[in-house]
Amino acid sequence: MKTYNQWLENLKQQEKICCIIRGIPGSGKSSKIQSIFKKYGGDENHVFSTDNFWIPHARAQKLAGNSVSHEDELAEYKGNWTPSKLGFAHQQNLENFKKAIMSGMTPIIVDNTNIVYKNFKDYEDIAKSNGYKVLIEEPDSPWWNKYRPYLKNKNDPNSKKNLDDFAEILANKNVHGVPLDTIKKMIANWQEL
């Protein structure tokens, strides 16, 4: 009994972590999540992504420990994705996040693009008001690190050319088939914090 009580006390004293991931599709957010797992623990159950709304079968398979091919997940994503349900999908993700916060889960990872601050403000506010340390994380892939500085001065002619190259790279790397035009819009809308 003493061991259980010690474990429970340690759990109560553990620092609660919420990592909010920011990045354009294809930038390396998924790899960043793996490094967060290595540092803080956790698994796919700790990841809250609006993308999960579009892949319920693939998500269930992953959570059960089964592998899902990239092709099958992409087919499910494309078959389910519709802009008319995007607002609902974001709201559903936020509600699932709130439940995890209330349970004390740690770490909690918000895996959305979070292009502008208002995209993740509610997550940050909820986490902080429940005693979580909030970390804003970006990918650390070589291509993100190479092109990230150009996002700070998007109107500079040199930056514009490099960001066009970056958009091409991201369009080819992202796993959900986000088109080049959409990626260019995300780059144009990227907000420095």
Image (cartoon, helix red, strand yellow):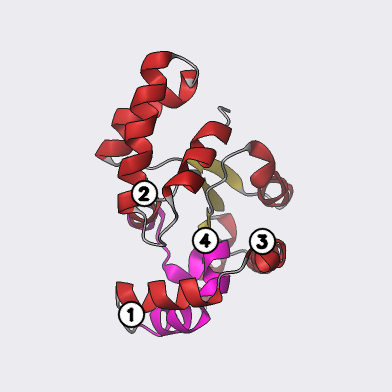
Name the residue that disc number 1 marks: 68
Name the residue that disc number 3 marks: 90
Name, please, the residue furthest toward the front: 181
129, above or below 155, in the image: below
Closer to us: 109 or 177: 177
Give the quadrant of the C terminus: top right
Which mark sits nearer the N-terminus, 2 or 3? 3
Q: Which of marks 2 and 3 is in front?
A: 2
66, above or below 73, in the image: below
For the residue marked with disc 1, what is the amino acid? Val
Which mark sits nearer the N-terminus, 1 or 4? 4
The number of numbered badges drawn on the structure is 4
Question: Disc 2 to disc 3, how far (Cα)?
Answer: 23 Å
| Disc 2 and disc 1 in contact, CB within 8 angstroms | no
Percent x, y of residue 54: 54, 73
For the residue marked with disc 4, what is the amino acid? Asn
Q: Is mark 1 on a helix, strand or loop?
A: loop
For the residue marked with disc 3, what is the amino acid? His
Q: What element carries label 3?
A: helix
Percent x, y of residue 158: 36, 16
Q: Which of marks 4 and 3 is in front?
A: 3
Closer to us: 49 or 165: 165
Percent x, y of residue 115: 56, 41
